[in-house]
Image (tube, rainbow, N blue to C red):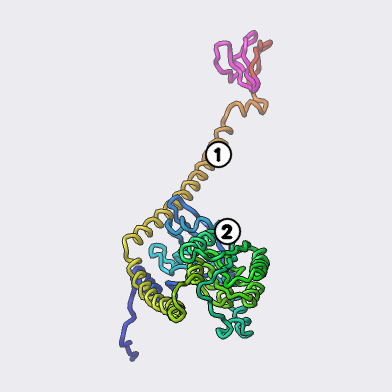
Amino acid sequence: MPQLPLFAPQTWSVTELTRRLRRLLEDDPALQDAWVRGEISNLARPASGHIYFTLKDSGAALKCVIWKGDALRLRSLPLRDGLSVEAHGKIGVYEPGGQYQLYVDTLRPTGEGDLYAEFLRLKAALEEEGLFDPARKRQIPVFPQRIGIVTSLTGAALRDMLHTLRRRQPLAQVILAGCAVQGEAAPLEIVAALRALNRHKPEVILVARGGGSLEDLWAFNDERVVRAIAASPAPIICGVGHETDFSLADFAADLRAPTPTAAAELASDITTDGLAKVLDEARQALPAALAARLQAEKLALSGRRARLGFASPRRQLAIARQRLDDAQRRAARAIVQRLQLEKTSLRGTHQRLASLNPLMILRRGYAVVTDSQGKIISSTQQAPAGSLLVVRVAEGQFKARVEEPGKGG
């Protein structure tokens, strides 16, 4: 006699199973902070302001949604079908459609990932060569009287540095060497500016620019620039980008500043040597410690935000808006199909009516014969000799007189 299983398998409703799968996806931290690379297809921008598209590669496809707020922030990126991108966001489930999708909050063209890989490769090679060795870094002079600056003459970074130097060390001589700070020509211009400045024997040189993407800052990862900074006779403070931006120029410089303004502050530090060293060590250690703490808090907050966000009225409203977008698309397709059916039916009716049109019969050579009173003649007996008849053909009518009576047939 067959034995019954100890535990009967659970029967799920579609909603229960979909929600279970959604929770599994949302509880995975890796899927709530994910970068996905692929090619855009089926791009749609409905009136709601959201953006819908499919991210695909040779093996699979992933539905993606950008909510209106993020879409406005990303409007400078010209999205189009066929564009290769890297999308960041959270994996979730659109329950009404029973599909998982990526809720995108950031997009970047494919290539920044390749740039970062090249960044790591070049960093490892130069590091092995000893170019970033802390032992070769020089002390920044206290109260320098001649300060060189390498940056764009039109950027906000120069304005901020000059303001800081005038406020903190107004007696210092500042020597400017303008150059491009991004683009293909930038590396050679930066190298030339460093060489020109060192001919004036500055006590310290500030190499700086404002923030930007990895591609924008790439000139400061160029090997020629890194080697020129390491070979500079004058010590260099590098302040490229924002606090979270790191370039190879930062590693080669004698001191790294988180921003251009901070670079000017370090060059005009008015504390004693001992205190300057303590503050410098604390300043260098603080970003790493703070970044680690912030990363831990970010992960914990991300999990809580994900659970809260998927249960929030805003998300429910967004899902309802997506349903509305789906309904609008279906309604538009239904209207087009109905119009096509009605058009086909009308064409058939028109053809049937045309085939019944008496004029069509007359065009084949037939005629309608009436007497002078308009009565149709259908027998020879109705047209004795001498009768006046009216004959209607396809292109008009004429009168005729019966010369002799017809014979019945």
Which residues fall within the magenta stretch?
A: 367-395
Callout 2 amino acid: Asp
In the image shown, does 350 or 144 lie closer to the viewer?
A: 144
In the image, residue 330 sits, relative to residue 184, either above or below, namely above
| Image quadrant assignment for residue 361 | top right
Question: Residue 350: where, in percent of width, then height?
Answer: 55, 35
Quadrant of the snapshot with the N terminus = bottom left
| Image quadrant assignment for residue 369 | top right
Residue located 44% across and 75% down the image: 271
Residue 251 shows in the view: yes
Callout 1 amino acid: Arg
In the image shown, does 245 or 108 lie closer to the viewer?
A: 245
Is 69 included in the stretch rendered in magenta? no
Q: From the viewer's perspective, is the residue at label 1 or at label 2 nearer?
A: 2
Question: Residue 39: where, in percent of width, then height?
Answer: 57, 65
In the image, residue 128 sits, relative to residue 162, either above or below, namely below
Q: Which residue is mark 2?
A: 81
Is 370 included in the stretch rendered in magenta? yes
